[in-house]
Image: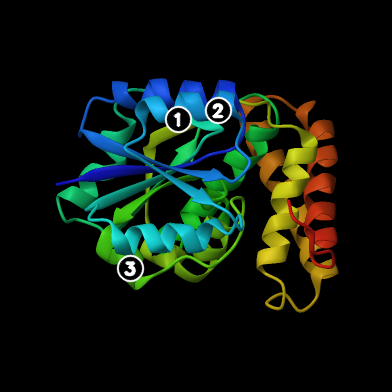
C-alpha cells in the first residue's frame, strides 16, 4: 500500500531541512514525499526539498486546498498524510501510529496531536484533554486538532470529502469544520513545532477559527466571552490538580488573547 506525505511548505530553510531529514527515518511504512510550495519559494528552501521529494507542486494562487484536491485526484496514493513544514514527528514511530489503523481498514482517517510545552501549548493541550471527553460522547473532534495538520486518511476518503479552496493555514481547519466527526484521534501520533509558539501566534489561531466559522456564530461577542470563561475554568482545574496556582495569572492573560482573537477574527478578513 502506497503511503505519501503531502508536505505543506513554508519558506523557512531550517524547518524544511529538518522535516526532510526526519521523515526518511520513520520506522515504517515506506513513503513518498510530495511537496506543495509557494510560487516564490527561496532557493535555499528549494534545495532541501529537491533532495527528498518525489514530486514538487507549485501553488501559484496559494489556494492549497484546491492544489491538494487536484493531486489526490491525479495521483495513485493509497494513504495520504498531511504535515506542515513548521512541524516534525516527535519520534520514529509517528508514521506507523498515524497510518496503521487506515492500512488495516479499521478507520478512514486519523488525526494526531502536538507535543506539549510549558507555555502556550499548555493551554491548547488543556483544551484537548477536556474536549476529547466530549468527543468520546458525541463522536466529533474539536477543531483544535486540525490547526496543525498531522492528519492522515485514505485516498477514497479525501476524494469523497474534498478540501475547501483556502490558504495554507486554513484549508485543513475549514475542512475539519465540515468533517470532524469522521476522524479518529490518536494521542500517540505526536508532532512538535520547530518555532516558538508565541502569544501572537495563539491569537492568530483563533482569528483563523473565527474566520472559518463566519456566518455560523450568531453572536461573536457572547461566544468570545464563553471561550474565555470556559478556558479559565479548565486551566484552574488542571492547575489545582498539578499544584501550580500561580499559573492562573498567565491563564487569564492567554485566555484574554484567545477570546480577543476569536472576536476580532469574526469581523476582519485578512490573509494570515
Task: Find residue 142 and report its horizontal and vertical position in percent.
Answer: 53, 57
User: Which is nearer the eye, 39 or 231?
Assistant: 39
Left/right of residue 214 with respect to residue 85 in the rendered view: right
State if disc 2 and disc 1 touch (CB < 8 Å): yes
- Circle 2: is it few (<14), some (14-19), or many (20+) Cα within 10 Å? some
At numbered mark 1, what does the secondary structure look like: helix, strand or loop?
A: helix
Can you tell which quarter of the image residue 120 is in? Answer: top right
Image x and y of residue 15, in percent: 55, 25
Q: Nearer the viewer, residue 53 or 22?
A: 53
Q: Where is residue 51 shown, x and y percent of the image?
A: 38, 25
Residue under label 3: 159
Q: Is residue 131 toward the left or the right of residue 100 in the image?
A: right
Cα distance in 3D space between marks 2 and 3: 30 Å
Cα–Cα span, label 3 and label 1? 26 Å
The Cα atoms of the two marked residues, 1 and 2, are separated by: 6 Å
Tell me where residue 143 sits by quadrant. Answer: bottom right
Q: Which residue occupies the foreground of this view, 35 or 140?
A: 35
Q: Nearer the viewer, mark 3 or mark 1?
A: 1
**Secondary structure beneath disc 3?**
helix
What residue is drawn where x is 42% and y is 33%?
190
Give the answer, above or below, for where 255 lies relative to 90.
Answer: below
* Comparing labels 2 and 3, the label whose residue is closer to the camera: 2
The label on residue 45 is 2
The reply to whether residue 142 is visible in this rendering is no
Visual colour scheme: rainbow
Q: Which residue is mark 1?
A: 49
Amino acid at each position: 500500500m502506497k503511503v505519501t506525505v503531502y508536505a505543506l511548505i513554508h519558506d523557512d530553510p531550517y524547518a524544511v531541512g529538518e522535516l526532510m531529514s526526519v521523515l526518511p527515518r520513520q520506522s515504517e511504512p515506506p513513503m513518498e514525499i510530495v511537496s506543495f510550495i509557494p510560487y516564490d519559494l527561496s532557493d535555499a528552501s528549494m534545495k532541501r526539498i529537491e533532495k527528498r521529494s518525489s514530486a514538487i507542486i507549485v501553488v501559484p494562487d496559494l489556494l492549497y486546498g484546491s492544489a491538494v484536491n487536484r493531486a489526490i485526484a491525479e495521483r495513485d496514493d493509497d494513504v495520504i498524510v498531511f504535515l506542515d513544514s513548521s512541524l516534525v514527528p516527535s519520534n520514529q514511530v509517528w508514521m506507523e501510529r498515524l497510518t496503521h489503523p487506515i492500512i488495516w481498514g479499521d478507520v478512514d482517517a486519523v488525526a494526531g496531536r502536538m507535543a506539549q510545552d510549558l507555555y502556550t501549548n499548555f493551554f491548547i493541550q488543556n483544551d484537548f484533554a477536556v474536549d476529547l471527553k466530549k468527543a468520546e460522547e458525541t463522536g466529533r473532534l474539536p477543531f483544535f486538532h486540525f490547526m496543525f495538520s498531522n492528519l492522515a486518511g485514505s485516498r477514497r476518503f479525501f476524494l469523497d470529502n474534498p478540501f475547501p479552496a483556502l490558504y495554507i493555514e486554513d484549508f485543513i481547519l475549514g475542512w475539519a469544520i465540515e468533517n470532524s466527526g469522521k476522524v479518529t484521534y490518536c494521542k500517540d501520533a505526536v508532532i512538535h513545532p520547530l518555532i516558538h509558539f508565541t502569544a501572537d501566534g495563539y491569537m492568530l489561531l483563533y482569528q483563523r477559527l473565527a474566520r472559518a466559522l463566519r456566518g455560523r456564530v450568531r453572536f461573536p461577542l457572547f461566544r468570545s466571552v464563553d471561550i474565555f470563561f470556559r478556558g479559565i475554568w479548565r486551566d484552574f482545574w488542571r492547575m489545582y490538580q498539578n499544584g501550580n496556582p500561580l499559573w492562573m495569572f498567565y491563564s487569564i492573560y492567554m485566555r484574554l488573547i484567545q477570546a480577543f482573537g476569536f472576536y476580532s477574527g469574526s469581523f476582519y478578513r485578512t490573509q494570515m
